[in-house]
Image (cartoon, grey):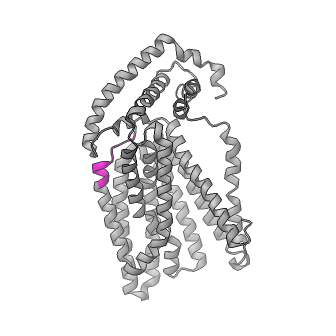
């Protein structure tokens, strides 16, 4: 916000980029590891509401400042950047009262602390609660098995294809260039500003709606519905673009239709695609590799998004409206990919998802068949662990009420 030169601004951008990268890598993993399986999707959706609330605020602040000195004041871009300091200023002290991930604690050998946190999260501080004991033993047994069975390559292959494939055909195409599209449609700067703000509000509403759909319909169904709708909107937008070229005398009408499609696209993306996309990546890795794997994916997503800003205008310049037909087809293709290769993770604990991905097959139907067999073996192992926990009385000895209250 205080930049006085291009070099200053570039350095600030690099530093901010590292901060955003760290935050995205950590928050997805942390959220997935402390939330119960039943509500993991809805909690993740509400978490993303903060993201779109920031986008929504930035657009409207920018729109309001566009009227200061006719839009020529540096305050128009300095204030939105400065306001981004508010959220971290609130979060930094709040971090000290947030629980650490029990899975990470057990990974590094701090089992007693992990049990205390699981007791608070699942049993209201009661370490003898059945859910607390089961989750604690499940994490313990899965970590032991992961030391031998974790296959980093298989997880990376599936998740990286998912990230790099899906996001290329959605957000880069209409969202990243939404403002440019509105300008080319002939809208004034003021109208473009409030339409961009409305687009941010649409994204926020879509993310709220996703909180009710993500767990209820499951990841697979949401993603397939999302790809079907997004592909359709792409085709419709291509038709609108073609019509605008053929009938320039009706540019205002086609411009209104194009802006409507951007809003519909944003809402659909946030309801059916954005949340399942990111939460799936945080779910499918084994506990021992979840942080590293998710960080790898975020890096791929960032590189892909950044490179898309460079190549997308060139493609549109060469192919014109046909570009969106190609993106639409790609979305339809991904419906088949998801159906065949992406098993359902909704409603399953992270430890049971770990079992789901231990299958040697790439196909969902074989994954599920192998999963049923491995679950039976896993249940036997967990039962032995629970029996040992009962015999030693370890849970009650570790967590007392006075210990749970500060956690």
Q: Nearer the viewer, residue 152 or 384?
A: 152
Q: Residue at coordinates 49% horizontally, 72% vertically from top-left?
A: 310
Say if residue 217 shows up in the picture.
no
Placement of 139 over or under 277, stated as above or below: above
Determine whether, in the image, residue 270 is placed left or right of residue 233.
right
x and y percentages locating residue 199 in the rendered image: 52, 65
Placement of 146 over or under 176, stated as above or below: above
**Which residue is at the far front?**
148
Placement of 338 over or under 97, stated as above or below: below
Q: Nearer the viewer, residue 179 or 362?
A: 362
Q: Residue at coordinates 39% horizontally, 17% vertically from top-left?
A: 384
**Which residue is at the far top?**
391
Q: Nearer the viewer, residue 120 or 106?
A: 106
Q: Residue at coordinates 46% horizontally, 45% vertically from top-left?
A: 282
x and y percentages locating residue 342 in the rendered image: 33, 47
Identify the magenta region.
337-346
Residue 404 occupies which quadrant of the picture? top right
């Amino acid at each position: 916000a205080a930049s006085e030169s291009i070099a200053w601004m570039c350095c600030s951008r690099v530093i901010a980029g590292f901060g955003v990268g760290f935050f995205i890598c950590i928050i997805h993993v942390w959220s997935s590891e402390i939330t119960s399986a039943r509500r993991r999707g809805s909690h993740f959706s509400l978490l993303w509401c903060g993201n779109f609330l920031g986008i929504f605020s930035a657009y409207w602040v920018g729109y309001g400042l566009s009227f200061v000195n006719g839009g020529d004041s540096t305050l128009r871009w300095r204030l939105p950047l400065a306001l981004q300091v508010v959220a971290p200023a609130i979060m930094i002290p709040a971090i000290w009262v947030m629980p650490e991930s029990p899975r990470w604690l057990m990974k590094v050998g701090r089992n007693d602390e992990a049990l205390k946190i699981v007791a608070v999260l699942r049993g209201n501080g009661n370490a003898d609660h059945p859910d607390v004991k089961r989750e604690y033993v499940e994490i313990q047994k899965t970590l032991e098995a992961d030391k031998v069975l974790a296959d980093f390559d298989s997880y990376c292959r599936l998740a990286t294809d998912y990230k790099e494939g899906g996001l290329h055909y959605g957000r880069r195409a209409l969202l990243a260039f939404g403002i440019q599209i509105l300008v080319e449609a002939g809208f004034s700067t003021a109208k473009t500003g409030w339409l961009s703000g409305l687009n941010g509000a649409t994204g926020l509403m879509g993310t709220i709606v996703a909180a009710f759909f993500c767990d209820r319909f499951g990841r697979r169904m949401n993603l397939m519905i999302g790809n079907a709708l997004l592909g359709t909107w792409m085709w419709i937008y291509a038709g609108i673009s073609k019509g605008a070229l053929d009938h320039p005398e009706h540019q205002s009408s086609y411009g209104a239709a194009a802006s409507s499609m951007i809003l519909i696209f944003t809402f659909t993306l946030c309801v059916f695609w954005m949340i399942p996309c990111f939460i799936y990546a945080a779910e499918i890795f084994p506990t021992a590799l979840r942080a590293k794997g998710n960080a790898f994916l975020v890096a791929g997503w960032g590189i892909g998004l950044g490179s898309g800003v460079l190549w997308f205008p060139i493609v549109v310049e060469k192919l014109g409206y046909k570009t969106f037909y190609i993106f639409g087809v790609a979305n339809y293709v991904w419906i088949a990919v998801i159906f065949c290769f992406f098993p359902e993770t909704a409603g399953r604990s992270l430890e049971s998802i770990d079992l789901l991905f231990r299958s040697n097959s790439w196909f969902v139907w074989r994954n599920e068949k192998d999963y049923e067999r491995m679950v039976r073996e896993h249940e036997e192992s967990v039962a032995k662990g629970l029996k040992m926990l009962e015999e030693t009385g370890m849970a009650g000895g570790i967590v007392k009420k006075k210990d749970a209250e500060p956690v």
